[in-house]
């Protein structure tokens, strides 16, 4: 596996691959890799001839007072994980490489989509995400880019940005990888103390409850949200940021949920903010009704 730290190295290598007729997949990450990230690399390896993963803790997507400095970093470990997963090149740039002195251009989506859900408590977040992902798209020029469904709002925003900016890159969403008790894998799970880690399983319990209601035929978004909230509120270490039923593409609140809609939640466990979600599938409902 090649380790690249500059845009130039990446461009030259990708050019060679493309000249040889090979397809290229991109997996953007902030490092502190876990099985969720590995599943994206594996998806890319299975669909593309060469896979580039980026490891970059992007400062512009952190709002003031968030965990930018504390965010876990262990590049040697990440490198080994990526190599084992079949990655062809890891791009590990410095902040100056991605944001050279005097950088003044940002990609900012003018849509309610980025102001909903996580956008409410993280106002600068999606501007930072769109900016860094645009830069990565321009540097790597992949055929396909892989993102996790765990960050459902991010995935929807990137799909929209890709269309709006005509990048011509296929965006591939990959299913959420979970721990044994259902907790969605996340680099931020490392912040959880033992008691908090146990309490964190409440997010998945809420997901299971939401799914159960929908399977039973419940279609009212507010009632689904309420039942999920009530379950989370029973956990003393949990504090709800949001639990919301929204349209899967536009992220606007939905009264009656249908196939493709999203039920998304963000919950603080102690000081750690965790997210989860599921997509409504009518198939599930029908299979129970039979
Ligand atoms: P991050 O390093 O947290 O910025 O995540 C990098 C990519 O990995 C994003 O596309 C995430 O959605 C994805 N990802 C993070 N956790 C998971 C997970 N548990 N399952 C699947 N994908 C994930």
Image: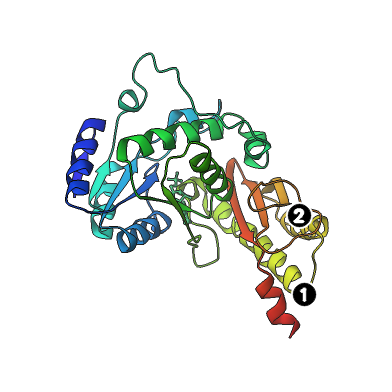
Q: In the rendered view, would you say 264 is above or below 121? A: below
Quarter of the rendering containing residue 134: top left
> Where does the image place residue 141, in percent across and percent down from the top left?
33, 41
Judge from the rendering whether residue 181 lies leftward or rightward of residue 207; answer left or right: left
The quadrant in which residue 157 appears is top right
Q: Which residue is drawn at 24% across and 34% down?
A: 5
Q: Where is residue 264 in the image (x, y as percent from the top left)?
A: 66, 52
**Crowdedness of circle 2 by 10 Å Cα count: few (<14), some, many (20+)?**
many
- Mark 2 vs 1, N-terminal side: 1
Give the side of residue 49 with respect to residue 60, left or right. Answer: left
Q: Please state the horizontal and vertical placement of residue 73, each as a whole percent of the image.
A: 35, 39
Q: Quarter holding the C terminus?
A: bottom right
10 to 188, vertically: above or below: above
Tag on residue 47?
Answer: none
Residue 208, placed above or below residue 19: below
Residue lying at 66% horizontally and 46% vertically, measured from the top left: 250
> Which numbered disc covers residue 229?
2
* Residue toward you, 235 or 213: 213
Dot 1 corresponds to which residue?
216
Instruction: Tell me the colour scheme of the image.
Output: rainbow
């Amino acid at each position: 596996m090649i380790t690249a730290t500059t845009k130039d190295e990446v461009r030259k290598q990708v050019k060679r691959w493309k000249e040889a007729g090979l397809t290229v997949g991109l997996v953007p990450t902030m490092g502190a890799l876990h099985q969720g990230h590995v599943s994206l690399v594996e998806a890319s390896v299975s669909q593309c001839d060469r896979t580039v993963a980026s490891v970059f803790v992007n400062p512009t997507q952190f709002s003031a007072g968030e965990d930018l400095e504390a965010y876990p970093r262990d590049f040697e470990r990440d490198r080994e994980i990526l190599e084992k997963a079949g990655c062809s090149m890891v791009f590990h740039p410095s902040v100056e490489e991605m944001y050279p002195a005097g950088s003044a251009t940002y990609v900012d989506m003018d849509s309610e989509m980025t102001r909903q859900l996580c956008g409410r408590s993280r106002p600068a977040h999606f501007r930072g995400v769109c900016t860094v992902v645009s830069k990565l798209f321009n540097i790597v020029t992949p055929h396909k880019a892989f993102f996790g469904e765990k960050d459902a709002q991010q995935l929807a925003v990137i799909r929209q940005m890709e269309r709006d900016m005509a990048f011509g890159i296929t965006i591939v969403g990959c299913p959420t990888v979970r721990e044994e008790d259902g907790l969605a894998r996340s680099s931020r799970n490392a912040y959880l103390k033992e008691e908090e880690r146990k309490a964190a399983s409440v997010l998945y319990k809420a997901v299971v409850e939401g799914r159960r209601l929908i399977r039973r035929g419940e279609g009212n978004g507010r009632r689904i949200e309420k039942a999920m909230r009530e379950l989370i509120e029973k956990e003393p270490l949990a504090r709800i940021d949001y639990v919301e039923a929204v349209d899967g593409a536009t992220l606007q609140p939905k009264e009656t949920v249908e196939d493709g809609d999203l039920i998304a939640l963000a919950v603080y466990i102690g000081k750690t903010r965790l997210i989860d979600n599921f997509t409504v599938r009518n198939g599930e409902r029908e299979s129970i009704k039979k």
